[in-house]
Amino acid sequence: MPGQLRDYFVVLPDSAAGAAAAGQLPVPEAAAGRSSAQDVTGPAREVSDALTVAHPSGRPWVVARPLVRKVSHLARGEDGLVLIGPDRVPDAVLAQILEGARDRTGLERRLARLPGLYHVVARLSGKSWIRGTATGLRRIYHARHPAAGTIASDRPAVLARLIDAPLDESALALRLLDFLPHPLSRRAVWRGVHETGAGYGLALPVAAPGTAAVPGPTEHRWWEPPPGDLPLAEGARRVGEAITASVRAHVGGRDRISCELSGGLDSTVLAFAAREAGPASLSLLTVAARDRYSEDESWARRAVEVARNTAASTAPALDHHVIPAADAPYFYADLASTAAELNDEPLPVAPGRARAELLLGRARATGSRYHLTGYGGDEIFLGLPHAYQDLFRGNPFTAWSHLGGLRHQLGWPLLPTLKALLDRSAFPRWLAGAVTAAPQPVARTPLLSWGVRQCPHPWLTEHAKTLIAEEFRAAAEHAEPIDPWRGRHVDIDGVRMGARHFQAMEDIGMTLGLPVAAPFYDDRVLEATLAVRLPERISPWRYKPLLVEAMRGVVPDALLARTTKDHMSSDEHQGLREHATDLAELWTGSRLAEHGLVDSRHLLRLAAEPFSPVLVEHSISSTVAGETWLRTAENAWPTHRPTPTTTPSEASL
């Protein structure tokens, strides 16, 4: 059966209906590398392939089916704490966090001692409180069950299954855009399923004594961006410590790990940080590029040579695997393989799944127990031009000086740049006009607003365009930015968008039985980055200066000197030609067309004309992702659903 959910947890109310809902949870198919009950600490148990932590009453509170994540749990009287993340948290640490935390604020202060990679489920004074991460790597969804009331989960598909929710066509239409900005990115693709905003927690109150009624949930903000006032030296020290802690949380104590070493700065940093974590062996994997002008492979080989020449006697055994370019699939290869995972939503990275599966499969073949990637490095450390809007308010001369350098690099005309810099449009106004029928901005258009304006792709139907326009108008009526400062809003929204996309890589890894991690998406890394003074963390004259300074002493200076970055646009365009037949088959009997969202005849014509100017101007990735996801979602559920039972004697705290 395709598209099985292989990893999830749910949080249930303390009621007979909540216990009954536990018996309706979907049971994933077994996958390679399946975790077992040994991945849980604290008094929990495995029931029908599920790990169950109970309420004081003995009814199920948290039911988890983790493949690669670890579930740590501790109870103190009526209060309890469950952490779900990459590593076990010792009972002593859990006790330090839970004991003395009289409210959510006190609990959050103590949780700040851990890497920011965990889902948190806590019970304080009878109320359950759940949150993910500020980066959006770990998210929370909730839905109203007809009998049990509010149920929360990290997977919207689980909730959709429990409440028999239909697809939401408006939310599906939104996913056909290239970029889905805050707050529309929170629109779950099933009706009745709601996403809690990143940086917010979800409180689930208990039912009143003697009644079956349960009040609705409330959201509470637990995370705020730190003030950006640290000098580069202090900020770099904190960033370096956060990266080190995040890497160790994923791979510390494992004997064999692997890293993707593209040759870029981000992957190079992760490779050397992984070496410092002390595994017995470290496998580095590089995919050679077809483009003869590519520099990535030569930089990757240089990194391996430097690592071997600077290795201490205690350094891990190092092997380097270069995957020939001819072995790497083009984009849009093996589109049917996207049915192997049911992602939370359509993700534009779906056309590259075959490439990701090749890399992770080769990594697993080395015996790797955990695979690290440099995903998130661009979003967190590169910095976007919008940030100069923030700098201009307090330091206009520095902002204009930096913008001058950037303007000459990007070819921005003087007067449009100045006009964009002086623009003070509020976020709701920008959001209302963020999707337009006007042509897309050209490359030389200054980017200093709240995000990127875009127009719907020409193969979308009028119905789809109407749904999209209505959603943006409705959202603009009550929209608030992530941060009042425009640059910070765009930076954080970009990080959260990238974290969503990375979920697809994690799910591919689970299918293959290899945990995959992006340590840069740790909350502590994001916080340390945002805490640095803006003109010191981004610069038109230096490439990722904060990351470079943070890893100086860990990564040799010769490797930190790279200022270029390769791209794979040629592989994507060539993929349209190589896999034209596959794309034509995809649009034949299109599910999106059945929903009235795309013109399948238009898409079939484009499949026959892979070098059409239309496909140069408009990416088809989001549409391919929507189509393949929709086909997977149709066949996502197994027919067998055993009902686990929980008794107070077996699962009591």
Image (cartoon, helix red, strand yellow):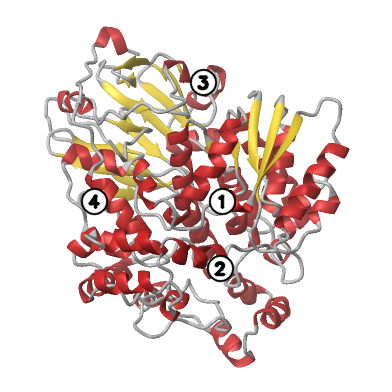
**Horizontally, is 283 left or right of 189 in the view?**
right
Disc number at residue 190?
4
Residue furthest bottom as drawn: 415
> Which residue is label 3 attached to?
95
> Which residue is label 1 attached to?
328
- Mark 4 vs mark 1, CA separation in Å: 35 Å
Give the SS element for disc 1: loop
Above/below status of 300 relative to 278: below
Residue 485 placed where, x, y %?
Answer: 53, 67
> Which residue is label 2 attached to?
487
Give the SS element for disc 2: helix
Q: Which amino acid does the dot numbered 4 rest on?
A: Trp
Residue 230 placed where, x, y %?
Answer: 71, 55
Q: Which amino acid does the dot numbered 2 rest on?
A: Gly
Nearer-N-terminus badge (4/2): 4
Residue 499 placed where, x, y %?
Answer: 49, 50
Residue at image x 30%, y 44%? 156
Mark 4, Cα crowd under 10 Å, few <14 / some 14-19 / many 20+, is: many
Q: Which amino acid does the dot numbered 1 rest on?
A: Ala
Nearer-N-terminus badge (3/4): 3
Residues at badges 2 and 1 in contact (C-beta under 8 Å)? no
